[in-house]
Image (cartoon, helix red, strand yellow):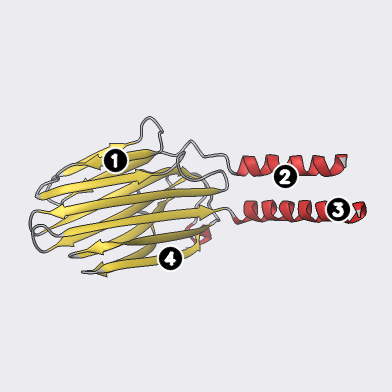
Amino acid sequence: MGNLNLKLTGIVAAAALLLTPVANAQISLQLDDGNGNTAYVTDNLATGMVSLNTAVGNWTANVTTGIGAPLLGSSFMDQFDLNSVNVSGGTGTMTLMMTQTDLSKVNANWWTAVGGTTDGSVTFQSYVDDGNTEFGLTNLVTSDMFNSAAFSSEDDGNLSGFGLTGLYSWTIVATIVHGNGNNVTSFDYSVKIPEPSSLALLGLGLIGAGFAARRKANKAT
């Protein structure tokens, strides 16, 4: 009985450690209309969320939010999200960028998902930068383009081929092109970088606990 309780306590402690939020990353947002008009904000207080709600050039409305650590993610999975609604006052291009720095899972798998609607076209690109640079565009991870409709897409892969050696940044770039005033593009873009080895260890531990509990129950009967 004592051994079983000790095993279960260890597994619960390990699970709690894996689910502990990460607190060291920093999120930044930037909007740029290509005509010298920009807006920028960074999460200096490490709250896990930054927002911009402003007109930029002839873009009459831009409501953009970036969410990451410590609100999203844990010690076994980095996670961050870019959400935006953009209304144009005429023909133009809007580039939105979100960075999360201080990522550390250099050989992990990654997964991205995006969905939204656009009256023009929108391109999404993700980059990783081994220098841990804000808005660093060193290595292109994924790219998708959508035109004049509702859209959604998912991509996945592994970071092992990008030569990452230490802390690195991940930057999402969304480029919106509108041909008329009052065109609207809205979207949500999510990135997850789980740690397979941590998940596997946790899974094995839970399976082991299940077998131990079943064995004890069988003995009792």
Dot 3: element: helix
| Residue under pointer 1 | 51
**Mark 1 surroundings: few (<14), some (14-19) or many (≥20) residues within 10 A:** many
Mark 1–mark 2 contact, CB under 8 Å? no
C-alpha span from label 4 to label 1: 26 Å
Residue 217 circle label = 3
Q: Give the quadrant of the N terminus.
A: top right
Dot 2 or dot 3: first in sequence order is 2
Q: Nearer the viewer, mark 3 or mark 4?
A: 3
Quarter-of-image position of residue 219: bottom right
| Residue under pointer 2 | 11
| Residue under pointer 4 | 155
Dot 2 or dot 4: first in sequence order is 2
Q: Position of residue 87 (x, y in %)?
A: 16, 53
Mark 2 residue type:
Ile
Q: Nearer the viewer, mark 2 or mark 4?
A: 2
